[in-house]
Image (cartoon, coloured by chain):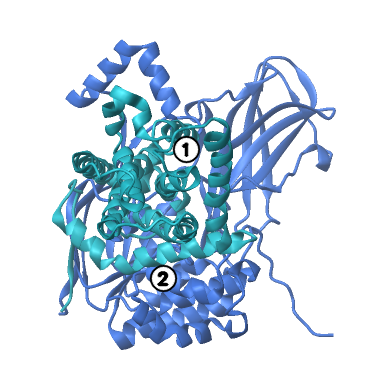
Chain colours: A blue, B cyan
Amino acid sequence: MKETVIAVKNIGKKYIITHEQGGYVALRDVLTNIFRTPLKFFTQKAKEVVGISKKEEFWALRNIHFEVRRGEVIGIIGKNGAGKSTILKILSQITPPTEGEIRIEGRVGSLLEVGTGFHPELSGRENIFLNGAILGMTKKEIVKKFDDIVTFAGIEKFLDTPVKFYSSGMYVRLAFSVAAHMEPDILIIDEVLAVGDAEFQKKCLGKMDEITKKQGRTILFVSHNTSIIRELCSRCIVLDKGKIQFDGNTEEAIETYIKLVRGEQGRSDVSAGKEEAKEANGLSIQEVSIINSENRPTSDLLFGEPFSVEVAISSRDTLKNISIGVRIESEDGHPITSPTSGASKKLFDLNPTSALRVKARIADCTLVPGQYWITVSATRHDQKLLEIMKIKAFFVGADSYKDTPSYTGGWGVINSNPEWSSY
Amino acid sequence: MTSVTTIKPKKTFSWNDIRELWRYKELLYFFAWRDLKVRYKQTAIGIAWAIFQPLITMLVFTIFFGGLAKIPSDGVPYPIFVFIGLLIWQFFSTALSDASNSLVTNQSILTKIYFPRLILPISTVATKIIDFFIATLILVGLMIYYHFVPHLYGLLILPLLLVMTFAVSTGIGLFLAAVNVKYRDVRYVLPFFIQILLFITPVIYPPSIAGKYAWIMALNPLTGIIKAARAALLGNIPINWLLLLISGIACLFTLLIGLIYFKKTEKYFADII
């Protein structure tokens, strides 16, 4: 049995949920609050100090125990929000845990993003040094490995060009190349392999394999992509809702993970969801659900799986010839497709007595793994009666549905499998 | 030998932090190097900017304050009088404003990689030392032009003054950088704050102008530094050692407060930035 290099004991991380609009606290607002309602401010402070304030707390991780031995490659899988990134951030010391203790033997290199600290104005050469230093390499090490880094990335000709002129592929190759040449005893990797083209991904996987097998390094690896996990990891930890659900053999872990993803009841009760109004012009959205190919409501779909969006709308008045729109948006809010029932010559009638239930089955849109939003709208004679933005989120996983060819990576939101030929 | 790291809920401050800072000195150098490189790549006239900016300020101040407003200058030509003040002032004010924004501008690095957070503001202040030395060339020119020969002990005291300016700007910079992470509107208030500070610091006028209230000005550590710099270089007035000592203590105190506040809030940076 090899010696333990990472011992995680009872780790927990608590976040306090703030309901600030806009995200940032402005000093201006804090000061105005103090002056406007000084009493309330001080009683609130006093309550916080005494600990009876009703701040909303959220444990991103709780009671996490595990040990890692030298040379192990461990995959960490789990749904979005399961706490994967948090555990990586704690292990890389970016954020401290709220409780518990971790003991790590050896130098840790963490790669939560490729090209951290790259500066667009600086040349490839300069960025190698800067990025290397940020990743924890000494100048001497960088000088020693400089040629290897350049060759691995294949950017010899552009060494003295500012990286802002690099193509995205070159940029990622250079960034990963620097990272691949740091020689930590323990390497912590977030989903960085999701970027770059398939060929380069293979090269990176090869490099990682070499790192562990030949040099006996330890790797902790987070991914959604179960095929990469299968290829690389001998052991897997499945996280769910901040707790360890399973720790052991990769195949069983992936099974557990898939069960978790499939078993989730994804039906959203709209009224319990976002605070903002779900109604306009007497129309109100009662429910929006994503239905998978097995006719079950879910929020996680397989890659390539056909799905349906079900919308229930009630109305105060009787309205005829209503067109319902279901827009799919990427995680950052860009519209991907905006089908409307009107465009398909399908109009619906609404009446006050019962809610209208509309189902849109979408089978011809292969979204790449990631998170997406549904926006629902209702239109009558080109007049928009109601539009509720981002009413529901859903995820597409990296595992393929039935015969869908597996996801090969790359940029974009829509997958396509062209037939290639020369002519 | 393998190093052992223990990750625990963070304590506020320990000597390990200083040791760690030393281990990461190379990164500090690289950040400073990056900032300088990028800055001089982005401006059309490059490094000449470091000469140009204080030179023009000096000329404008000389024309309006020295020439038209006839502000006294302790019996030395106004250009050289105001320039010594400006050298220290520009070091302080640019270091302060850039250090305050250093965490926010490096947000993407801060949330992805661990390194002692102190490095960011400190390296920002360090780049200003380079600007300071470049601008010193103008001072040398002025001293030759006006036939001033600095005293030997005067030259010896200059590094001390530089260290004091470094300490006070780092101290306030650390404090504001940490505050800036939480309250993003600080950066809008800062230029105003710095502008006001210019007028309560004896840059364009001698502290003697305040008469019997001069002691109030001594509370501002920059007063002692600028006064001592003028005395050391020009020899027109003796160095006020007591004032310098008070300023020195004030600088150290500021640095300590900034450091403690920064370390105290540091653990939340990656979570709330």
Rendered location of residue B52, percent (x, y) = 57, 55
Give me the residue at 33% from left, 56% from top.
A89
Q: Where is the C terminus of chain B found, in terms of image quarters? A: top left
Question: Can residue A221 be spotted in the picture?
Answer: no
Amino acid identity at mark 1: Arg
Residue B79 position within the rendered picture, expressed as x and y whole percent measured from the top left:
50, 46
Q: Any mark on residue A404, and which?
A: none
- Determine whether A289 is above or below B102 in the image: above
Chain where mark 1 sits? B
In this rendered view, identify the residue nearer to me: A290 or A171: A171
Q: Position of residue A40 (x, y in %)?
A: 31, 13
Residue A21 against residue A193 in the figure, above or below: above
Looking at the image, which is closer to me, B227 or A96? Answer: B227
Residue B187 has which mark? Answer: 1
Depth order, front residue of A409/B254: B254
- Secondary structure type for disc 2: helix
Above or below A281: residue A413: below
- Residue A229's tag is 2
Which quarter of the picture shows residue A70? Answer: bottom left
User: Tag 2: residue type?
Assistant: Ile
Q: Is residue B105 above or below residue B26?
A: above
Q: Mark 2–mark 1 contact, CB under 8 Å?
A: no
Q: Which residue is drawn at the image coordinates 41% and 70% (left, top)?
A: A229
Q: Callout 2: few (<14), some (14-19), or many (20+) C-alpha neighbours within 10 Å?
A: many
- Tell which subunit mark 2 falls on: A
